[in-house]
């Protein structure tokens, strides 16, 4: 399999952590790309029409995207019921947490593009503030969750979202008012799959 990849992407990291946990990392060749909405990558676009990573090319040559779909595909390849709980309340909790963490990533990546890509004279502070409010409110919700002792697609996604905030928004100091989440992130970050995929320092 081939995976369009960038080490900064929290969505790609979700896929890599999932592959690591399922023992599939060796079956995935990483194709390193750099892209933004204003500097698209032709190869990525030919696999994923919306031009985003991660995009996976399966052994059969089928392109799959986005990160939730790829993670679920890898889970199926590995036989199922490992990273995605099969049924019941634990399944919905895991999927909801994935959606919450992906929402943090979406707001953070859009803000990153606003800060790093959009010309200064075109920036819109209220819009950026709105994205930041989403991130802060989602983090406050996570502070109230019982995340301990669970390692599934929900907590993988949360760990990757927090790692992205550390990479791109260290000044936000998300740990300050969220001691439980901070302690959880420190403990879970030692897991080999997360340690092996940590983004390089900026
Ligand atoms: O938006 C673009 O044109 C290019 N951006 C991406 O490909 C980002 C890379 S994170 N990926 C996504 O937005 C994927 C979202 C999708 N719903 C999923 O896979 O779950 C780059 C972060 C950075 O460089 O700081």
Image (cartoon, grey):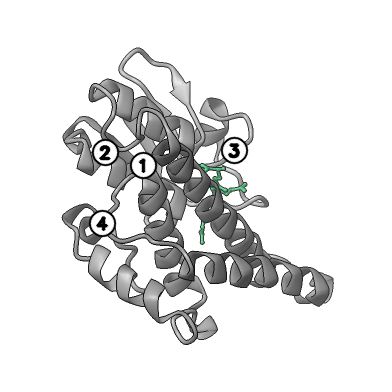
Tell me: 60 left or right of 63: left
**Res. 91 image quadrant:** top left
> Is disc 3's CB within 8 Å of ligand 1?
yes
- Quick one: label 4 or label 1, which is nearer the N terminus? 1
Residue shown at the point (34%, 63%) measured from the top left: 199
Mark 4 burial class by Cα count in 10 Å: few <14, some 14-19, many 20+: few
Q: Which quadrant is home to the N terminus?
A: top left
Residue shown at the point (60%, 44%) measured from the top left: 40
Residue holding disc 3: 51
Residue holding disc 1: 15
Residue 143 marker: none
- Quick one: label 2 or label 3, which is nearer the N terminus? 2
Q: Measured along the vertical axis of the image, is residue 86 above or below residue 92? A: above
**Res. 158 image quadrant:** bottom left
Whole-Å distance between the Cαs marked 4 and 2? Answer: 20 Å
Question: Whole-percent x and y of residue 36?
Answer: 60, 53
Whole-Å distance between the Cαs marked 1 and 3? Answer: 17 Å
**In the image shown, does 74 or 183 lie closer to the viewer?**
183
Question: Whole-percent x and y of residue 97?
Answer: 48, 50
- Quick one: label 3 or label 4, which is nearer the N terminus? 3
**In the image shown, does 94 or 62 lie closer to the viewer?**
94
Residue 158 at least partly seen: yes
Q: Which element type, helix, strand or loop, lies under badge 4? A: loop
Q: Nearer the viewer, mark 3 or mark 4?
A: 4
Residue 149 marker: 4
């Amino acid at each position: 399999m081939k995976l369009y990849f960038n080490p900064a992407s929290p969505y790609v990291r979700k896929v890599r952590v999932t592959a690591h946990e399922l023992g599939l990392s060796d079956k995935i060749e990483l194709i390193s790309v750099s892209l933004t909405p204003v500097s698209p990558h032709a190869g990525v676009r030919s696999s994923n029409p919306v031009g985003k990573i991660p995009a996976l090319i399966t052994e059969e040559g089928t392109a799959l995207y986005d990160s939730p779909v790829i993670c679920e595909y890898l889970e199926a390849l590995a036989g199922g019921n490992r990273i995605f709980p099969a049924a019941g309340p634990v399944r919905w909790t895991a999927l909801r947490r994935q959606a919450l963490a992906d929402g943090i990533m979406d707001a953070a990546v859009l803000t990153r593009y606003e800060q790093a890509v959009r010309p200064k004279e075109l920036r819109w502070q209220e819009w950026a503030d709105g994205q930041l409010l989403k991130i802060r409110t989602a983090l406050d919700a996570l502070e109230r969750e019982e995340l301990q002792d669970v390692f599934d697609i929900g907590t993988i996604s949360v760990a990757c979202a927090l790692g992205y905030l550390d990479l791109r928004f260290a000044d936000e100091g998300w740990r300050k008012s969220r001691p439980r989440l901070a302690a959880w992130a420190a403990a879970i970050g030692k897991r080999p799959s997360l340690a092996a995929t940590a983004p390089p320092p900026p």
